[in-house]
Amino acid sequence: MEALARRGQARMTDTPHDPIAACAEMVQKGDPDRFLATMTGDVEERKRLFPLYAFNLEIARAPYMSQEPMVAMIRLQFWRDLIDAAVDGREAPKHDVATPLSQLVIWGDVRAAPLVRMIAAREDDAQGALRETVDQIQSYARETSGALMLAAGQASGIADFSGDHDVDQALEGLGEAVGIANWLMAQPALLAAGRGHIAPSPDTIRTLCEGGLEALAHARGALDRRGNAALRSAWRAAPVLRHARNTPEAVAAGALGQSEFSRRGALLWKSVLGGW
């Protein structure tokens, strides 16, 4: 039995480490909606999207990992430096997220610009920037989730490297709608974290939701109706935004989420039909 155990341990030790699998595990734990959406894609889509979404988690967490802004800024500067190096063709040292992310930039699968915008927004988080007005919240959603959707669109072939203004704008608008929905769902956690966060008023919630739903409608008209894993990451936005618009008090109560059955069922249905 001991010999058998040693042989099994040896096989486990000899198994090469897979950074994409590590990114997928990180996304599964930290961003389950995007994980489920990515799993509806093909293998190549997953290879590109999981490092991108893992990077998003890394920078989103940075401002909340310490009470000292400088600590967060140092963490975020690491990612800035990594992207700058990738633009120059230099691959990141061995790291579960940094290495495959740098490869996406080096190989031209993702442009650096949206990644840098995402980092800048998180640097504002670290510095304690408040988002109170509709314009401030929409801008924040666009610079985080909107830029992420643009990068995901590039990674999955919706937007080519040279860029198409109309397609890029539609992707950013779609991501902004997702970001607003996620921001509204995150209100209880943001309030618990403190940092001077101010809960949105019912009027602000309604205006944000109307804008998000308009952006979703525009994206559906401007982008291909055939879905892929990147576009399906927006599958929950519409029902969340409609719920918040119609029942603003559900935001503070943390009652915007669908049941697990409804959440997964809606994604499965869109995947089966090939839509988003």
Image (cartoon, rainbow, N blue to C red):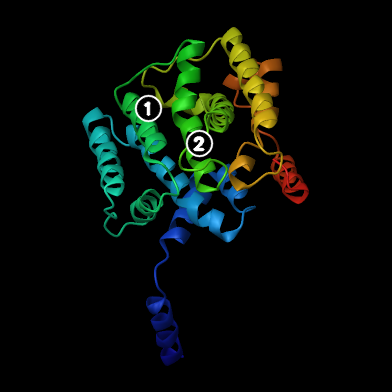
Q: Amino acid at mark 2?
A: Leu
Residue 207 visible? The answer is yes
The x, y position of residue 43, in whole percent, is 57, 60
Residue 68 visible? The answer is no
Residue density around tag 2, few if under 14, some if 14–19, many if 20 or more, within 10 Å: many
Residue at x-position 46% and y-position 20%: 139
> Mark 2 = which residue?
150
Q: Amino acid at mark 1?
A: Ala
The x, y position of residue 163, in whole percent, is 49, 36
Q: Nearer the viewer, residue 183 or 168?
A: 168
Residue at x-position 39% and y-position 68%: 17
- Front label number (1 vs 2): 2
Q: Nearer the viewer, residue 144 or 161?
A: 161
Left or right of 191 in this view: 231:
right
> Mark 1 = which residue?
121
Q: Quadrant of the C terminus?
A: top right
Left or right of 146 in this view: 265:
right
Q: In the rendered view, tell whether residue 6 sits above or below residue 157.
A: below
- Disc 1 is placed on an element classified as helix
The x, y position of residue 105, in whole percent, is 38, 48
